């Protein structure tokens, strides 16, 4: 984790001047996000916070890397640690808020995969919240994708967990 910490500290500066650092740093962040051990919670939160910061500050440069690792953010939402879940939700919202609306089609399969019944309910709930927020943030793109979205979302209307439905 020390190597990742050092990379994260210089990420904001490096991303603007040397975007090639993103091809190694973002996958390392994604790997750190999904670690589930008790000792790994602080590292997961740090990686999720770095992801959110990168999404807020350098979206145009980092967007392809961030979108590719979005599944790890959603997977972190299923963590048993509450602070990891909160950081995952903040990271997801940071990307959705600042991303180019044309990325909607790229994120939908990731969101559909995260919303599957076999995933933890917190992960499913966040995936469905993200799909709902795309309606506000990217209405035209989500409207064009409705034939794909409606069957996926309809399956969750009768979910046992109130937070998911």
Image: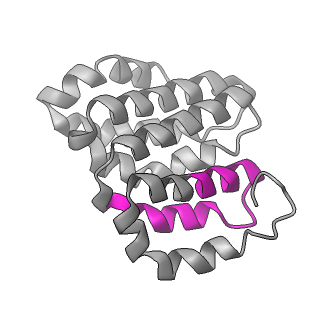
Along the viewing direction, whichever of 138 and 94 lies nearer the viewer: 138
Instruction: Name above or below for residue 148 compared with residue 102.
Output: below
Give the total of numbered labels. 0
Q: x, y (%) of residue 42?
A: 61, 21
Q: Is residue 5 left or right of residue 157?
A: left
Residue drawn 31% across the image and 39% down it: 24
Q: x, y (%) of residue 140?
A: 35, 67
Residue drawn 63% across the image and 49% down it: 126
Residue drawn 61% across the image and 80% down it: 151
- Residue 118 visible here: yes
Q: Is residue 62 left or right of residue 163?
A: left
Instruction: Name above or below for residue 1 compared with residue 162.
Output: above
Q: x, y (%) of residue 27?
A: 40, 43
The answer to if 110 sits in the magenta stretch is yes
Along the viewing direction, whichever of 97 and 77 lies nearer the viewer: 97
Along the viewing direction, whichever of 145 and 38 lies nearer the viewer: 145
Instruction: Name above or below for residue 143 compared with residue 137.
Output: below
Stretch in magenta: 103-129
The answer to if 145 sits in the magenta stretch is no
Q: Quadrant of residue 44?
A: top right
Q: x, y (%) of residue 50?
A: 42, 27
């Amino acid at each position: 984790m020390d190597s990742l910490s050092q990379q994260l500290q210089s990420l904001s500066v490096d991303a603007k001047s040397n975007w090639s650092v993103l091809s190694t740093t973002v996958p390392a962040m994604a790997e750190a996000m999904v670690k589930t051990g008790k000792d790994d919670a602080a590292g997961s939160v740090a990686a999720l916070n770095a992801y959110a910061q990168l999404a807020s500050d350098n979206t145009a440069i980092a967007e392809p890397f961030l979108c590719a690792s979005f599944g790890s953010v959603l997977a972190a939402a299923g963590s048993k640690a509450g602070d990891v879940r909160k950081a995952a939700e903040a990271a997801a919202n940071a990307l959705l808020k600042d991303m180019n609306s044309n990325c909607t089609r790229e994120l939908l399969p990731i969101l559909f995969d995260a919303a599957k019944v076999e995933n933890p309910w917190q992960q499913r709930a966040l995936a469905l919240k993200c799909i709902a927020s795309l309606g506000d943030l990217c209405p035209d793109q989500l409207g064009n994708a409705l034939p794909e979205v409606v069957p996926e979302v309809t399956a969750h209307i009768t979910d046992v967990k109130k937070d998911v439905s």
